[in-house]
Image: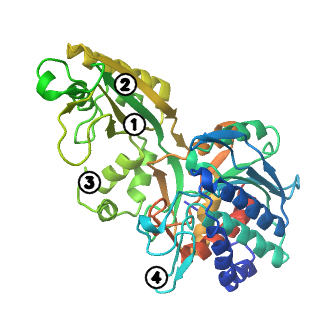
Amino acid sequence: MSSPTSDPTPPQLYSYIDSHSTAFIARLREAVEIPSVSGEAARRPEVVHMAHWVKAQLERVGATVRLVELGEQELDGQKVKLPPAVLAQLGEDPKKKTITIYGHFDVQPAERSDGWDTEPFELVHDEKTGRLIGRGSTDDKGPIVGWINAIEAHVEQGIELPVNLKFVLEGMEESGSEGLDELVIREAQGFLKDTDAVCISDNYWLTTSKPALTHGLRGLSYFKATVSGPARDLHSGVFGGTIHEPMTDLIHLMGKLVLPSGEILVPGLKELVAPLTEAERKRFDAIEFDVKDLYDAAGSKTTISDDKVTALMGRMRYPSLSLHGIEGAFYGAGAKTVIPAAVHGKFSIRLVPDMDPDVVGDLVKKYLECEFANLNSKNTLKVEMLSGGKAWVADPEHPNYEAAARAIKTVYGVEPDLTREGGSIPVTLTFAEALGVNVLLLPMGRSDDGAHSTNEKLDVSNYIQGTKTFAAYLHEVAKAL
């Protein structure tokens, strides 16, 4: 992908990063020790504390920083302020290109009692494994601190940044990014108007051994199908066999959505998917990946396909439909002979280009209503699309990606895999559409980092080499754009 070229990055930057690894780990330790859990009202002040910590760190390396208030929300039965977004800038030279960096400083909840081997909000350096263990180490405090480290290396070595930098950092990513889309759209003609490209480091390598660049994300449409009938829950000994049972109807409908092979049964969805191009197929062929990695991740050999390309395209290139649960049904221990009065089936569809969420929602609703009519049930069906977000895909041959690929080749000595993610990062599409520029996903961590899980970690090698990659990317993209 990247053409051979001499490294434009001053070598003393790499030396500085290597020699200051201990200090950089200490900086990440400070960040992890702030329990910035956005989803808990009691810890909302810690998210605000984290915003001020990030502001201070950026100011120390010469950035102009402001905190932007985003309003209020209802959380845990009380009204609380949203944590402020951090907008920062280094340089405004009209002769230089401007790169906007996105990240988030909030984290998922974590308690030692969840099964952590260590205290989640204390960064533990396991020197045997080379792992930095702690909540937020990889998602997403490690990358944010990595950018600060890369800037510090420039400042301390007296090396001018080759591009203007802008940062958009939020404290609500783990709780729906409330207020962020509005901020980005509002600032598209303000703070962000001179952006030439965007770089996001909030995802992971496909494997544990080879760096990757990500150029696509699936979208998501989430649905609730409610079947209701009796005015209240009923005794199956009295009413079983005499009424139409909502659970029976719902189970039938959910069984009509997807086959065990993964094939989606909703008519018209397949026709919305953009045709596979030969260039795309070659990219999937080129990815270094073993289906065994899927076995390890799933803890079983229950993959739909054991073919590498088929498995990868099933995860990244094609839509999928997953059944998530039934609300209102009995699920506890023991036996309960109740007929529920109403049940709510939850399912979602991961979207790919060119699937429009509104069109998908209409097709799903029409199909389920038709299948329900065929049951001749006297119950009532209501189908709702609770949320819908489009897929995002970028051109991996754009100069922004080629610059990142060269940086990875310089630091790691290998060409990166070009991947697409099965999940969603909604703000990616917001940046792409609001700013009209290329958006790059440049991961720091590995596939086994365990973001959102117990014992979340970031390998020291990824942290330090990732910081070098960030520094090299700035010099490469300055040449490429």
Q: CA distance from mark 2 to mark 1?
A: 10 Å
Query: Which labelled disc corresponds to residue 349?
Result: 1
Q: Which amino acid, by three-letter code, is at mark 1? A: Ile
> Residue tagged by mark 4?
129
> Residue tagged by mark 3?
303
Do the CB atoms of the residues marked 1 and 4 lie less than 8 Å apart? no
112 on left or right of 174: left
Q: CA distance from mark 3 to mark 2?
A: 26 Å
Q: Which amino acid, by three-letter code, is at mark 2? A: Val
Determine the residue positioned at 41% across, 44% down. 317
Do the CB atoms of the residues marked 2 and 1 lie less than 8 Å apart? yes
Q: Position of residue 44 (x, y in %)?
A: 65, 53
Q: CA distance from mark 1 to mark 3?
A: 19 Å
Q: Is residue 257 above or below residue 145?
A: above
> Residue tagged by mark 2?
364
What color scheme is it? rainbow
**Dot 1 alpha-carbon crowd within 10 angstroms: few under 14, some 14 to 19, many 20 or more:** many
For label 4, the SS is loop
Determine the residue positioned at 72% across, 40% down. 71
Q: Is residue 56 visible?
A: yes
Q: Earlier in the sequence, mark 3 or mark 2?
A: 3
